[in-house]
Image (cartoon, helix red, strand yellow):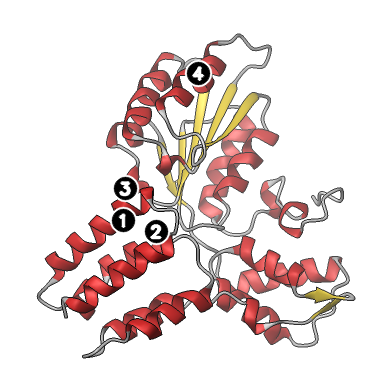
Amino acid sequence: MVNTENSLLVEKYRPTNLNNYVGNENIKKSISNYIGQNDIQNLIFYGPAGTGKTTLAKLIIKNIDCDYIYINASDERGIETIRDKVSGFASVASFKPLKVIILDEADFLTIQAQASLRNIIETFSRTTRFILTCNFIERIIDPLQSRCQTLKIVPPSKLDIVKHLNKITDKESIKVSKINDLAMVVNNNYPDIRKMLNTIQLSTQDNQLKLDKSILVSSNYMDKILSELSENKPSFTKIRQTIADANVDDFDELFRFLYENAAKFLPNKEGTATALINDHQYKANFRIDKEINIMSLINNLIINK
């Protein structure tokens, strides 16, 4: 189903039923069974940004008979949100057979908030279900994970995404002169489908897709950084330019990527790399300019070569 009232492609083509949801066939079967029973387990969807976690959560509540509340935990991450909004909604009587609370980006919830949520899940287990979405499952405390069915949202293949985007451009009467143009959009933004749709919309003029390479966000910027860090004398300037060209404003994935590949650029010093990454990832929570923080990390990694 297409939301014809919305001018944003990312919202206009947000799936409202499982038939229009691309990928994750096994998960779709489980969700289909839940919808058929008009009940769900407490769920945690995790995986890379833009791969359909929030879409799947919203799809569920559209297809079962429930009252629901949506909370963006990156904006409301403290224990007050759990005590006031979550507990308040869960404790209020409903005429529907079920209540569902979506906590989007739940990995931003504080430890205290997560601990409080654990008790609320148990207290209202007869009437209320919870759907949590997050990029990093390791940031969700174990007691919460044990109370939920944890499902990893895997990005669809690049070929499946190209086919999906081709259907959308056809429906929008957007002329694509070269099929490679769609492939380029996918390659430069994979696995973030949301960014792909935004790029297509931004690059469409007079119903013609005209790609501007300056606005394409390079998905392989992390590989370029790794390659430069692996040199005998890495260039701080080159890495800074790579990050600037990629136009990235969230470096959580880069922190994890550097941690997983520490042996490649600081062999026999993985412990040092881990300590530096951990320190700067923690500081990122308190820095307004996150690019300065990540470049501080890069500088420290180069110094320890």
Of badges 3 and 2, nearer the viewer stands 2
- Work out whether mark 4 precedes mark 2 in sequence or the reverse, and give the earlier one: 4
Q: Secondary structure at mark 2?
A: helix
- Work out whether mark 3 precedes mark 4 in sequence or the reverse, and give the earlier one: 4
Q: Amino acid at mark 4?
A: Asp
Task: Give the numbered dot on residue 138.
Answer: 3
Crowding around mark 2 (Cα neighbors within 10 Å: few <14, some 14 to 19, many 20+) is few
- Residue name at image x 75 percent, y 75 percent: 203
Residue wearing tag 2: 252
Q: Secondary structure at mark 4?
A: helix
- Residue name at image x 45 percent, y 75 percent: 243
Residue 59 image offset from top left, x and y in percent: 65, 41
Task: Give the numbered dot on residue 84.
Answer: 4
Residue wearing tag 1: 281
Question: Up-down: is 93 above or below 280?
Answer: above
- How far apart are the alpha carbons under marks 3 and 4? 26 Å
- Work out whether mark 1 precedes mark 4 in sequence or the reverse, and give the earlier one: 4
- Work out whether mark 3 precedes mark 1 in sequence or the reverse, and give the earlier one: 3
Residue 283 image offset from top left, x and y in percent: 31, 52
Crowding around mark 1 (Cα neighbors within 10 Å: few <14, some 14 to 19, many 20+) is many
- How far apart are the alpha carbons under marks 3 and 2? 12 Å
- How far apart are the alpha carbons under marks 1 and 4? 29 Å
Q: Amino acid at mark 2?
A: Asp
**Viewer-nearest residue: 190 or 161:** 190
